[in-house]
Amino acid sequence: MRLINVMLIINIITLCASGQFYRNDRCRVRDLQEAGRCILIRNCPYALKLVHQYRYPQLCGFYGIDPIVCCPLNNIATTTSTTTTTTTTTTTTTTAPEVGPRTNSISEQKCKEYSAEPSEEVPATIGVGPSVIGGEKASAEEFPHMAVLGYGDENAILWLCGGSLISENYILTAAHCTYSAEYGDVKFVRLGDLNLKLDTDDAQPQTFNVASIVRFPEYKPPIQYHDIALLKLDKPANFTKYVRPACLYDQRNLPDYPRAIATGWGKLGFVGDASDDLMKVTLAYYTNDRCRQVYSNAGQRRLPSGILDDMQICAGGINESKDTCQGDSGGPLQIRSLDNYKLFYIIGVTSFGKGCGVINTPGVYTRVSNYIEWIEKVVWSQ
């Protein structure tokens, strides 16, 4: 999901959803007053034409990270299936322990260990105060825990989701990012990068294969609860000033900060190219009562109990268009440590939203503190 601030970026293509529909559901194309079906946007020539005219297709929802639009029945493209040879990774589920925050946790001990490692001091350029606006490029070394997830063939990797380094061997991400309908399981992880295409940026990237995928066992799509997963790297990450783990926020109540920071590489539009640059945006917290109202029409299939405060956080722009969008999925919602300005605590994992950059419409993030015991069991069990 791309970080969007339309006050700074012109001609961003956004889609606004008035309800929640699912792949192959029947719908009605409002502009044409015709019957339609919810399909992937790439299979709907009518929707693609609208996008190229800077008009808004009618959004049904998302299939993983792929937009689904209401397409006229007479305009649905036929597709053919292709078979490719892929590298096999191990996908596992684990027994779900009792979830919830704990103090003096292993993750907090590891946080102190990682933060004690020497690193060069660099000036940070973003805070969490109300005077900071979002939608800007991140600085070199500013988010050394930031990961980008790759899919497809090794010779033509598609970077489609985000994640966070939390130990030498593990990436924290969203469960829905572990698989793409078109490209299969996530296969690659890159750390320490700033611009995904330039070799001249101030970065020292490290690239890994995904050795195993561990989804939270109660994640049952299309239901959007428990959207959290861990990726094991095929070799330990080398800690540098460009690559270093973030800490996990293990308290139930959010800290008394007015805003949090979201980061990621994302698309310029629903069918546009991804941003080459790592972006950052400051977001305000929404009360879950207000968030529940926004998502009250999400339906039983996705949110049968509505937004759940224990496992989800809502954040976004208030009276302005700030948001995360597809391509930023799996990336962190984070705050800075009061003791160490370079150290970040991850409070949420980017999960889903309703459109992108819609004013007063927050995105939804998986609440990390609710899954600390499970994360510790997987990551630091040895």
Image (tube, helix red, strand yellow):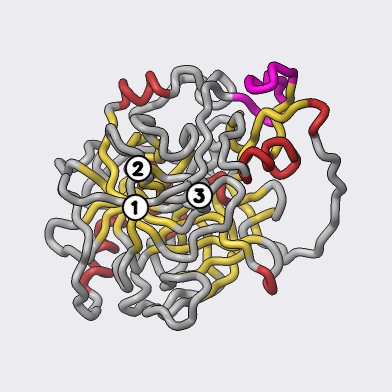
Dot 3 amino acid type: Ala
Image: 277 above or below 357: below
Magenta range is: 21-35
Nearer the observer: mark 3 or 2; the answer is: 2
Q: Position of residue 308 (x, y in %)?
A: 39, 26
Tell me whether circle 2 and circle 1 mark residues in contact (CB < 8 Å): yes
Residue 168: percent from left, percent from top: 41, 70
Q: Horizontal placement of 258 versus 21: left or right?
A: left
Q: Which residue is mark 1?
A: 135
Amino acid type, mark 2: Lys
Q: Is residue 284 visible?
A: yes
N-term-proximal mark, 2 vs 1: 1
Residue placed at 28% from the left, 48% from the top?
282
Residue shown at 58%/52% (left/top)? Answer: 272
281 or 44, which lies in front? 44
Nearer-N-terminus badge (1/3): 1
Quadrant housing residue 307: top left
Residue 309, position as x, y percentages in the image:
34, 28
Distance between mark 3 and mark 2 Cα atoms? 25 Å
Q: Amino acid at mark 1?
A: Gly
In depth, the one of 116 and 154 nearer the eye is: 154
- Provide residue 346's location: percent of width, then percent of height: 32, 52
Count of numbered tags: 3
Is residue 220 in view? no
In the picture of the structure, the residue carrying the numbered disc 3 is 229
The residue that label 2 is drawn on is 322
**Residue drawn at the location 27% of the way across and 44% of the way down:** 102
Task: Give the prevailing secondary structure in the magenta stretch.
Answer: loop
User: N-terminal of the two: label 3 or label 2?
Assistant: 3
Quick one: SS at disc 1? loop
